[in-house]
Amino acid sequence: MPRDQAIETIFTATDDAMRAVWGLHTYMEAAVEVAERRNLLGKLPDGSFQLTHEWSRLYDRNELLNEMDQLGESVHCRASLLVLVSLFEAATRRFYGRLVELNRAEHLERENYKRLLKWAFKTVQQSAIASPKARDRLPETCGDVDNARRLRNTIVHYNGRYDEKYVADAIDDGWVKVQYERGYEPNVRLGNPIVLRTDRYEYFSCSHIELLHILHNTIQSRFFGHNVGYNYAEKGKKIEWRRVLGA
């Protein structure tokens, strides 16, 4: 049977957008690494910058550059993670909405992201539309995606510092392998900052894209009878960057 085109469109748009985030992240990291300090300084506004349409704000560009030398990678990774999580949340919501529209799923009483993830995790739990390696790793992959959700919430609501909800809000259903961020220990003082590096952002990107593919293929199989998945490695297809970046 053919794939549902609406579901496939949601998948394709999200898959492209996640690769675009990776492309931008990687490009910016490389550009900053090779840029000369004096050239960076010369590109920054001197003394003040426009904060709103009405206000300007005084600042020291040397101080900004010095702090970015120390913290820029983590700040950049946080920003990339926020986009990655938002994209996956939107895709999950749209997948579910499409199934509700077709009367193949019931309305959730509270359609928040955590509940949508629980639905997604349950959907892929018995999936046969994935490689044996990916299926074996699914409990951890789902744990990664939920960890990213909790990190996103903590970054947005608690100024990027660990809080009690980061632990308490984890999806722990006996199947999902709950993940905590590297360097986080349950007994450390709450309020410690979340520090992310590029390798962690790339790890989260891999988990989100892998789960997106498995979820999409499982939906097409379970609800529409289409049992043929898609594998980048088998197709050997290169990324069309102009299309992915939206040009």
Image (tube, rainbow, N blue to C red):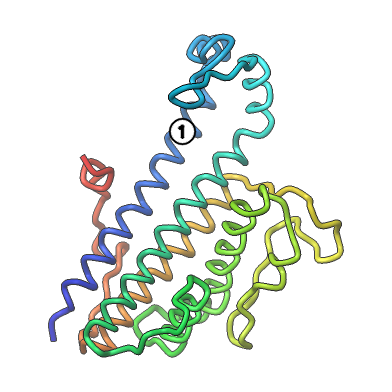
Q: Quadrant of the N terminus?
A: bottom left
Q: Would residue 42 be found to the left or right of residue 157 on screen?
A: left
Q: Nearer the viewer, residue 101 or 20?
A: 101
Q: Nearer the viewer, residue 40 or 63?
A: 63
Q: Inspect this view and state whether residue 134 appears.
A: no
Q: Amino acid at mark 1?
A: Met
Q: Would residue 10 be found to the left or right of residue 67 on screen?
A: left
The residue tagged with tag 1: helix, strand or loop?
helix
Q: Nearer the viewer, residue 153 or 212?
A: 153
Q: Quadrant of the C terminus?
A: top left
Question: Measured from the top left, where is residue 30 in percent x and y?
Answer: 48, 31
Position of 145 relative to 50 (above/below) = below
Q: Inspect this view and state whether residue 9 appears.
A: yes
Query: Which residue is most to the left?
Result: 2
Q: Residue at x 56, y 61 (%)?
A: 148
Q: How many marks?
A: 1
> Label 1 neighbourhood size at 10 Å, few (<14), some (14-19), many (20+)?
few
Position of 173 relative to 230 (above/below) = below
Q: Residue at x 30, y 82 (%)?
A: 219
Question: Measured from the top left, where is residue 73 in percent x and y?
Answer: 60, 37
Query: Which residue is most to the front?
Result: 54
Position of 154 relative to 89 (above/below) = above
Position of 92 relative to 38 (above/below) = below
Q: Residue at x 21, y 65 (%)?
A: 9
Question: Measured from the top left, where is residue 199 in percent x and y?
Answer: 57, 49
Report the residue marked by disc 1: 28
**Residue 234: which quarter of the image?**
bottom left
Q: Residue at x 55, y 64 (%)?
A: 149
Question: Measured from the top left, where is residue 144 in percent x and y?
Answer: 57, 67
Q: Would residue 208 be found to the left or right of residue 191 on screen?
A: left
